[in-house]
Image (spheres, helix red, strand yellow):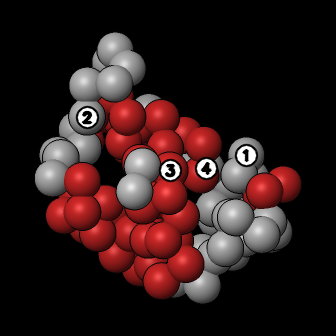
Amino acid sequence: MDTESKLMQIFKKVGIDFEKNIYLKDENVFGSKIRLSARDLLIVFFWIESVFKIRIPEELIVNGDFDTYEKILNTVEKCQGKKSL
């Protein structure tokens, strides 16, 4: 299973199906269209680190690189070394 498929499966666990709702991939996960709770995003964060066996640097979260599906996917790929930080 590739990175994006794994990430989609993680989000499905908190009730968000980006596969069926592609148009939401660039929406803020806390915004009115997705309405993810901070607690659920924290759960997603820990699942991502566990499933992908990566550590996500705090500065990537503080810089806003963890607030949309696309940004989270890019962050995971950066941390896996698939993209440059």
Q: Name the residue under label 2.
A: 80
**In the drawing, does residue 69 fall left or right of residue 51?**
right
Residue 10 at x, y percent in the picture: 44, 71
Q: SS for tag 2?
A: loop
User: Which residue appears at 47% of the width and 35% of the height?
Assistant: 74
Disc 3 versus disc 4: nearer the observer: 3
Of label 4 and label 2, which has the lower sequence position? 4
Q: Is mark 4 on a helix, strand or loop?
A: loop
Residue 52 position (above or below residue 33): above
**Label 2 crowd (10 A; few <14 / some 14-19 / many >=20):** some
Give the residue at mark 4. 68
Neighbour class for label 3 at 10 Å: few (<14), some, many (≥20)? Answer: some
Q: Residue at x 51, y 83 (%)?
A: 14
Instruction: Write down the residue under mark 3.
Output: 4
Residue 65 visible in the picture? no
Q: What amino acid is labelled 3 in the image?
A: Glu
Q: Mark 1 points at which residue?
A: 26
Residue 26 at x, y = what percent?
73, 46
Determine contact: label 1, label 2, CB under 8 Å. Answer: no
